[in-house]
Amino acid sequence: MGKIYLKNIRLYAYHGCMDEEKKIGSDYLVNVKVGADLKTSTKTDNLKDTVDYVSLYNIVKEEMGRRAKLLEHVAERIVNRVLEDHPTVINVSVKVAKCNPPIGGNVEEVAVKREVKRTSSVFD
């Protein structure tokens, strides 16, 4: 098994419960880590034999573009899409961080992390 990482994907989005967040938005950083069997791709050097990180990026971009109140909800949507779109992924970790959140204090970021292991094998 191997790991594929997408680190610090920076996006602008409009998540949050406050009216201000709906209107002005905020910067977000998203990190994705997937575990998959990469043995075949190490031998074939063929994109179809691995988890395409461009596809992972596009999933993050699309789901971050769909407004939500909670970061938990956004992270779960990303996790579910990765597992849906990539049957060879065994586990996935997604961290969604809101930069400089409007919480009345000097806080660099607030973040939510979801780590999910596929419950059934792709060979079942």
Image (spheres, rainbow, N blue to C red):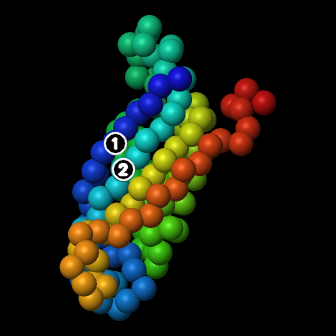
Say which amino acid is labelled 2.
Asn
* Marks 1 and 2 in Cβ contact (< 8 Å): yes
Residue identified by numbered label 1: 6
Q: Left or right: where does residue 85 sit relative to residue 11?
A: right
Q: Secondary structure at mark 1?
A: strand
Residue sitting farthest toward the right:
124
Does the rendering let one see residue 1? Answer: yes
Q: Residue at position x 49%, y 47% from top?
A: 93
Instruction: Indicate which disc, 1 or 2, sits on the residue closer to the N terminus.
Output: 1
Q: In terms of image quadrants, where is residue 46? A: top left
Q: Is residue 63 above or below residue 16?
A: above
Q: Residue at x 50, y 15 (%)?
A: 39
Q: Is residue 10 above or below residue 111?
A: above
* Secondary structure at numbered mark 2: strand
Along the viewing direction, whichever of 9 and 87 lies nearer the viewer: 9
In this orientation, does residue 64 appear? Answer: no
Q: Residues within 10 Å of mark 2 (few under 14, many from 20)?
A: some
Residue lying furthest top: 43
Would you place residue 99 above or below residue 40 in this image? Answer: below
Q: What is the number of the mark on residue 104?
A: none
Percent x, y for residue 34? 48, 38
Residue 63 image offset from top left, x and y in percent: 43, 60
Residue at image location 78% in from the left, 30% down from the top: 124
Which x, y percent locates residue 70? 47, 75
The residue labelled by disc 2 is: 31
